[in-house]
Image (cartoon, rainbow, N blue to C red):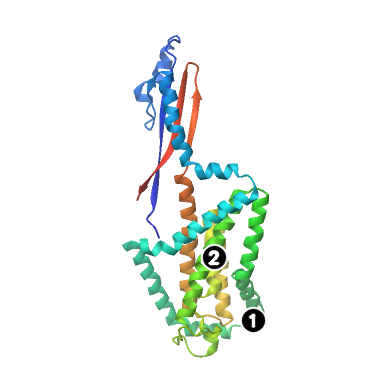
Amino acid sequence: MLPARGVISSEIAVYWKDRSAKPRPTHMHQIDSPGRRPCHRRRIRSSGSTLLAAFLVVAPVHAQLHEDSASSQQQTGLPGIVLSDMRTSLRLALRAYSAPFHWDGKDWLIAGGGCALTGLSSAADVSLRDALMRSHSSAAGHAADAGIAYGDGLNVAIGVAGLYTVGLLVREPWLRETVMLAGTATLVSASISTVTKFIVGRARPYTGSGNHFFKPLAFSEDHVSFPSGHTVVAFSVSSVLAERIGNPWATAGLYALASLTGAGRMYRDGHWLSDVVPAALFASVIGRSMVQWFESDKGEASSSLDLLPGPSSLTLVWRFNLTSAR
């Protein structure tokens, strides 16, 4: 994970006043007194030529900051929007893949905690499997299958493609961006977990080999238990949706649904508990990071250029955001 960065809002104003105008009432002069000015605004009283010069300096900088935003607004066609989303998705994916190279001590400590939790969960692998095998029922089977369907990669791919198309056609940015983020998080986490599966080569529970049997690079369906792929997909989607919706009830429901996916895979004897726990932790970090990076990038790029006319004055205001490491 990359270091978090804060955003400091500020503004620069160039103020022109018509000195030929009649003096304002006393109470109006009090409004312009130094004690009443906003703390982030600097006013430079000057001639009309200074105002024009400031505009010629500020406008190109403002245009450069909004190059991508203006380009996307001009490209009102659907291909332009899709291309912009593809660039964003690729940028976020590359950032996720390279994130460990930028970790600090806190990040490595969190990763170590996840590994420790995985090791602790392995102590309950066999006992939990035995309990699940003894508790089979029709209702439990339906619930398990529903959870597994939620984490199925093909189902998620179809859902992402369909909802993205809807958001694109109805010009709904929030829906389109959310689905794009969910798809990107799923692709990144699933690609990493798939490579890990073949490298580790852990035996699935139904093989009867036990939870400590590993056969690296076996390239066999029986030896790709760690981590749980369905759980990775489910938590990637749920974490993105939870972050974007921002409602505690929705968050609880989404994570509960993703947890049902992991429980369903264990119920069907496809994974150990220690396959599900790291998958859930890893995918949640990926999904949350995707949303935070995306929204941070959008916030840092925001700025505006306003021309505010008054009765006998004209103010050019450039509002912008400055980033600072935290």
Residue at the spot of label 1: 137
Q: Is residue 270 visible?
A: yes
Kind of residue at badge 1: Ser
Residue 245, image x, y percentages: 55, 54
Residue depicted at 36% across the width and 70% down the height: 112
- Disc 1 is placed on an element classified as loop
Q: Residue furthest toward the bottom? A: 208
Displayed quadrant of residue 214: bottom left
User: What type is the residue that disc 2 sits on?
Assistant: Thr
In this image, 12 relative to 87: left or right? left
Q: Which residue is mark 2?
A: 186
Label placed on residue 252: none
Q: Give the secondary structure at mark 2.
A: helix
At a point 64% along the width and 78% down the height, the residue shown is 141
Is 128 on the left-hand or right-hand side of 103? right
Q: Could you tell me residue 164's position as x and y percent? A: 63, 56
